[in-house]
Image (spheres, rainbow, N blue to C red):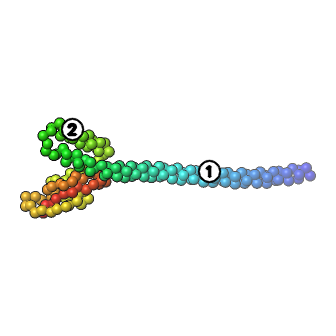
């Protein structure tokens, strides 16, 4: 009888051990699946954050460019007037030199904001950069060649702040 009890106990122990092993495997599988799920969520969250940082940086750069462009477009008429004053004929050379000095300082300030003049005279007309205000026929000039500039144009990078007003030949 003792043998039978021992045999029954061993079978129950095996059964309990088997059940425990199954439970442990289930727990391990659940734990691994939770780890995998959390790892996946972490990777997605990290990728979303990286995209957010890039998008925010791009938005800041665009906003800075827009604000700079707006401010520069408001002060370009001042630059035009300084150029006109510097080119005006006067006998007071000290006055003329002072105006030229202020114009150079103003030009340097614009350059510090990456503002560039749009080259025009002698170039081919480009509607992205130039605004044609007149057209002349001149056999010595090429097709769509700019012969005169009424007002200088300016750009920041690839963004045109103000188009050049030009006369186009042929």
Residue 12, horizontal then vertical, whole percent: 82, 53
Find out whether the residues at labels 1 and 2 contact each other: C-beta distance under 8 Å: no
- Which residue, as the protein is rendered here, is positioned at the far left? 139
Residue to which mark 1 is pinned: 35
Q: How crowded is mark 2: few (under 14 residues within 10 Å), some or many (20 or more)?
A: few
Residue 149, horizontal then vertical, whole percent: 18, 54
- Locate the C terminus by quadrant: bottom left
Quick check: 51 left or right of 7?
Answer: left
Residue 141, horizontal then vertical, whole percent: 10, 58
User: How many marks are shown on the rendered structure?
Assistant: 2
Seen at 16% across and 53% down, the residue is 121
- Mark 1 vs mark 2: give the one in front: 2
Seen at 30% across and 49% down, the residue is 75
Q: Which of 52 and 156 is in front in this view?
A: 156
Residue 146, horizontal then vertical, whole percent: 16, 57
Residue to which mark 2 is pinned: 98
Dot placed on the residue nearer the N-terminal end, 1 or 2: 1
Quick check: 2 left or right of 120?
Answer: right
Q: Nearer the viewer, residue 108 or 159?
A: 108
Seen at 13% across and 44% down, the residue is 89
Seen at 27% across and 50% down, the residue is 76
Q: Is residue 119 visible?
A: yes
Q: Is residue 119 shown above or below 106?
A: below
Q: Nearer the viewer, residue 57 or 97?
A: 97
């Amino acid at each position: 009888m003792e043998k039978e009890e021992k045999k029954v106990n061993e079978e129950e122990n095996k059964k309990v051990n088997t059940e425990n092993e199954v439970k442990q495997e289930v727990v391990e599988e659940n734990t691994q699946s939770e780890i995998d799920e959390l790892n996946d969520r972490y990777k997605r969250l990290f990728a979303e954050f990286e995209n957010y940082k890039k998008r925010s940086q791009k938005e800041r750069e665009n906003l800075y460019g827009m604000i700079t462009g707006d401010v520069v477009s408001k002060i370009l008429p001042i630059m035009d007037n300084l150029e006109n004053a510097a080119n005006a004929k006067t006998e007071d050379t000290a006055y003329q030199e002072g105006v030229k000095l202020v114009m150079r300082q103003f030009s340097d300030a614009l350059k510090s904001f990456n503002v560039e003049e749009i080259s025009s005279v002698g170039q081919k007309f480009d509607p992205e950069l130039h605004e044609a205000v007149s057209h002349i026929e001149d056999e010595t000039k090429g097709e769509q060649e700019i012969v005169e500039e009424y007002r200088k144009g300016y750009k920041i990078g690839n963004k045109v702040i103000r188009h050049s007003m030009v006369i186009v030949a042929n």
